[in-house]
Image (cartoon, helix red, strand yellow):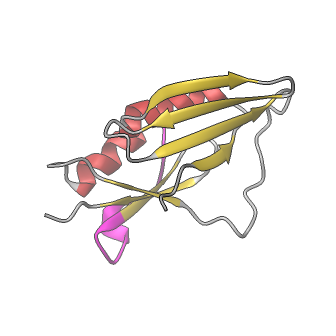
Amino acid sequence: MKLAHTMLRTGSPEKMIEFYKKAFGFELREKKEMDTFTLYFLGSEDQTAEIELTYNHGKDDGYEKGEGFGHIAIHTEEGQSLQEAYDKAVEAGGEDYRPPEECPGNYAFVKDPEGYEIEILARSA
């Protein structure tokens, strides 16, 4: 079995799509318009990861994150340092949350424009 995707609810799909594109190279692969909601499927360049953004029509003020959700994790690109990946995510609109120097391992955390935590993992050589 293979994990198909991770779904995140969003009140601002355009902003989220732009962030994941600029920060991590995800591309909008498919948009499904329904009566009361719209689904946006974003895929990684190598097609190994997919995020589904769900926009419930009229729900523009975002969502509470709930204490059960932790984070999603994304590896750095081949040849990219952890600091470079972190800086790129922050420049793309991510929140400067837990930079590499504050984490005890080879990782860091940013928050996307809706406040979801993203762990950036340094790809091992």
Residue 48 visible somewhere in the drawing: yes
Q: Is residue 39 left or right of residue 123?
A: right
The reply, left or right, for residue 122 in relation to residue 9 is left
Looking at the image, how many numbered discs can be counted on the residues? 0
Q: Position of residue 105 (x, y in %)?
A: 31, 75
**Which of 84/25 is in front?**
25
Relative to the observer, which residue lies in front, 21 or 105?
21
Q: Is residue 113 visible?
A: no
Q: Position of residue 30 (x, y in %)?
A: 56, 25
Q: Residue at x 86, y 27 (%)?
A: 36
**Magenta region includes residue 106:** yes
Name the residue: 76% across, 63% down: 66
Question: Residue at coordinates 24% horizontally, 60% vertically from top-left?
Answer: 123
User: Residue pushed farthest bottom?
Assistant: 104
- Quadrant hosting residue 98: bottom left
Using the image as rendered, state which of residue 92 and residue 20 is in the foreground: 20
Figure quadrant of residue 17: top right
Q: Considering the image in quadrants, where does the C terminus appear?
A: bottom left
Q: Is residue 38 above or below residue 62?
A: above
The image position of residue 67, as x and y in percent, is 73, 69
Residue 81 in the figure: left or right of residue 20: left
Whether 47 is drawn above or below 123: the answer is above
**Which residue occupies the extreme front position in the image?**
1
The span shown in magenta is: 93-107
Q: Is residue 27 magenta?
A: no
- Determine whether 58 is above or below 117 in the image: above
- Where's residue 71, x and y in %? 55, 61
